[in-house]
Image (spheres, rainbow, N blue to C red):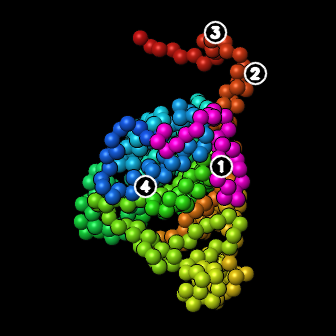
Amino acid sequence: MTTIDLGLPSIGGLDGVPTTDDKQSAKDYKSDQEVRWCPGCGDYAVLAAVQSFMPTLGLKRENIVFVSGIGCSSRFPYYMDTYGVHSIHGRAPAFATGLAVSRPDLSVWVVTGDGDALSIGGNHLIHSLRRNVNLKILLFNNRIYGLTKGQYSPTSETGKITKSTPMGSLDNPFNPVSLALGAEATFVARAIDSDRKQLTEVLGAAAAHRGTALVEIYQNCPIFNDGAFDVLKEAGERERRIIPLRHGQPIRFGARDGSAGSGDEGGEYGVTRDPNTGSLQVRKVTEVGESALVVHDASLADPSYAFALSRLTDTTLAHTVTGVFRSVDRSTYDDAARAQVQEAKDSRPADLQALINGKDTWTVAG
């Protein structure tokens, strides 16, 4: 089985899932269903990346399940030649939890959108993260409701003019990565639909993680919110805005090879810790020196560092942190639930008559 090493601790997210010796390709994961998203939709890029990535896991396709809720992203299971469940609005994590608990031989993936996951499904999402169920959640974030034709979503920026907010949204938007870290998710990452290399690396790290892994994917909606993330893809702006995380390395980004007058071969900017407040901030490396840069550690038990990193990103996209924020080891809900059931079987043999003759009784009046 091929693995992608990001220098992160290996927790064995695929333990117990049957593998195959058959050579697989992306074609093996393409279903016979016509892909029906709008031309230019970022979902195409994510689908292609996932279909190309899945063969590297070496798993049997019949032991892989994609679960979705409602939304444009939720068509995803139709296009994967694996098992799939197109469930109900916001409830994909609940369906996936049932599968993960009852079937340890499955690799369970959730595909959801910013509206599906963070509005009607917000409660299900945070509790799956809190419980650390062994499943992988791909959260497509296009900052809009696409399937229902362009209403503002929980990640739309304040002031966003849409069909449902003609004078501008009054809501303060969620930062999905911050939300996940606030729920103490054991694995949290972010990638961009058009960055195939980093998206594949992040997917590999998520698959190797045992527990709930949430990957937020910035994704373009060409019809109702076109160009929402274009600034992160433009040459020059991309280097100045995107802060890529690499475990064990100083957090540095920006123009290289001295092209911005930095005088060295590293990025012009870096992330440092404010000596007065302890918060993280972006500074020019020439002003603070290489030694002042924060060395990224995704394995820290305390989520406050990863949360501080997530706060460097806001709706203006002046800076956008990508990569793996957090990857830590913690017992999973489904492993614990199965162990508890087995313990009950071993120590408390089933006795239906004893249950019927129990001390709890009810009198039903006629």
Secondary structure beneath dot 2 equals: helix
Which numbered disc flags the more N-terminal residue, 4 or 1? 1
**Residue mark closest to the camera, 2 vs 1:** 1
**Distance in Å between CA atoms under marks 4 and 1:** 22 Å
Residue 151 image point, x, y percent: 29, 57
Task: Name the disc covering residue 112, or none.
Answer: none
Secondary structure beneath dot 3 equals: helix
Write down the residue under mark 3: 353
**Residue mark closest to the camera, 3 vs 2:** 2
Which numbered disc flags the more N-terminal residue, 3 or 1? 1
Which numbered disc flags the more N-terminal residue, 4 or 2? 4
Q: Amino acid at mark 4?
A: Ala
Q: Quadrant of residue 17?
A: top right
Residue bounds of the magenta highlight: 1-28
**Distance in Å between CA atoms under marks 3 and 1:** 52 Å
Q: Quadrant of residue 324?
A: bottom right
Evaluate whether residue 18 shows in this view: yes
Write down the residue under mark 2: 347
**Distance in Å between CA atoms under marks 3 and 2:** 17 Å
Say if 274 sits above or below 179 in the image: below
Q: Name which residue lies at 71% across and 50% down.
A: 10
Which numbered disc flags the more N-terminal residue, 3 or 2? 2
Say if mark 3 contacts mark 1, CB within 8 Å. no
Residue 2 image point, x, y percent: 65, 47
